[in-house]
Image (cartoon, rainbow, N blue to C red):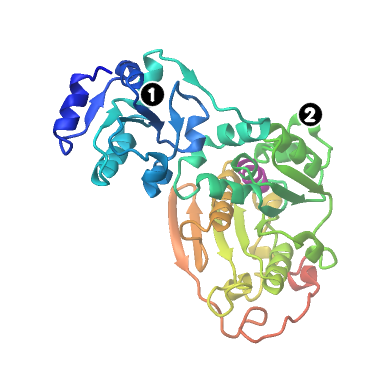
Amino acid sequence: MRRSAGQDELRDNPRMDIREISPAQVREHLAQGAVFIDVREEHERVSGQAEGAVGLAKADLLAEPSRHLPDPQRAVVLICQRGGRSMDAARALQAAGYTQLLSVAGGTSRWMDDGLPVVKPQLDAEAADFYDRYSRHLLLPEVGVEGQRRLRNARVLMIGAGGLGSPAGFYLAAAGIGHLRIADDDVIDRSNLQRQILHTNARIGQPKVDSARATLNALNPGTRVEAVQERVTSANVERLLEDVDVVLDGADNFPVRYLLNDACVKLGKPLVYGAVQRFEGQVSVFDAGRQRGQAPCYRCLFPEPPPPEFAPNCAEAGVLGVLPGVVGLLQATEVIKLLLGAGEPLTGRLLHFDALGMRFRETRLRADPHCPVCAPGVPFPGYIDYARFCGVG
C-alpha cells in the first residue's frame, strides 16, 4: 500500500510537531487505513459529524487509549469542533507512544463549511430534544450532561405566578426544570399585565396558575407544570413543600414570607427570597434548615415585620414594571445554582437592586443565635397566625 509523504515523515520522526491536514485531505488518509475519530462530546456530535468518523469523547479516548487504538503505529486522524481539542488529544497520544497522528485544521466547522458529507447519530425523539434544546447548557462545564439531567429530575415550588413568578417561571421552564409546582389563588387582572408577563390580555379573569401552565407548556413541553390554585396557608404549606428541592417565594407579602421561612426551616428546604417595591428590589437565599447556626433565615433578618404603613404593597406604592423582571431572574438564577451545586449562592447575603441608580449593593447576613425558629437545638415552635403577626387584615 502506497504511503503519503506526510506518513513517511511521521514514521521517520515520530516526535516531530503533529501535522494538521485540511478536511479534504482526510479521505486520502482513510483510504490508506487511518482511523478517524471525532473527539467531541456526544451532545456536540448530535448536530452532525464528519462522515466516516467514529465518535469518542476526548476524555474517554485518553483514559484508555490502548483499548480504542491497540496499534500505536497505525495512523490516527482526529477531529473536533474547530481544531484545538483534536490537537491536544494528538499531543497526549503522542506522549503515550502513538507515532502517526494528524489533526483536522478547522475541525467539524470547516468540514461543514467545505460542504463535505456529515452524518447524524440516530436518537429517539426525547434524546434529540434534550441534546438540541439544552445544547448551550451542555457546553458549560458547570452544567454539562449530568447537570442538565439533574435539572430535569428537579422539583421546584414557586409560590406566586405574578410579577416575580413570571420571569422566574419562564427561565426555570426554559432551563429544563423537570417539575415546577406553582401555587397561586389569584385571577388575572388588567393591572397585572404591566409586569406579569406569563399572562395575556385574552386571559383576563382566568386563574393565574392555569395561564402560567399554558404559557410554560408552550415554551417547554418537557417541564411538567403542576398548577395549584390555592393560597398558601399553615394548613397546606407542608403539602405544597412535599418532595420539592427548592422553594421560590414570588408572593411578595409579609405573611407568606414568614410562613414559608418557618416551613422551610422545619423541613430543611432552601428558600429563594425576592421582594420589590417602587424602584428597588432584594434577593437572598435562606437555607437555615440545612445549615443551622451557619446560614440565617428570614427571621434572622427581620425578627418582626415592619408596621403596615411602612411597608405598603405594590397596589398601594406602585412598582416599575421591569423591576420584578430583574429580581425574578435573579431568583431563578439562584434556584438553578442551588440545584446544580454551582457557584456561590446568596446564602448569608442580601442583594439590593436600585433600578433608578442602576446599582447593586450587598449586605452580609448572620445567623441569629437566639432566633426562635432556626437557632441550633431550638424545637420548631409551630405555625402561627401570620396575618395577625404582620398586622394584615
Q: Which of the image's four quarters has the C terminus?
A: bottom right
Q: For the residues carrying marks 2 and 1, which lies nearer the camera in this image?
A: 1
Residue 132: image quadrant is: top right
Relative to residue 349, is residue 40 depicted above or below?
A: above
Relative to residue 303, is residue 189 depicted above or below?
A: above
Instruction: Give residue 124's mark.
Output: none
| Image coords of residue 99 (percent x, y) | 24, 36
**What range of the chain is rendered magenta?**
165-171
In front here: 121 or 262? 121
Outermost residue, top side: 115
- Does the magenta portion include 323? no
| Image coords of residue 101 (percent x, y) | 27, 33
Residue at image location 84% in from the left, 54% down from the top:
230
In front here: 389 or 311? 389
Q: Which of the image's four quarters has the N terminus?
A: top left
Q: Amino acid at mark 1?
A: Ser
What secondary structure prevails in the magenta region?
Answer: helix
In front here: 196 or 145? 145
Mark 2 lies on a secondary structure that is: helix
Mark 1 lies on a secondary structure that is: helix
Residue at image location 25% in from the left, 41% down from the top:
94
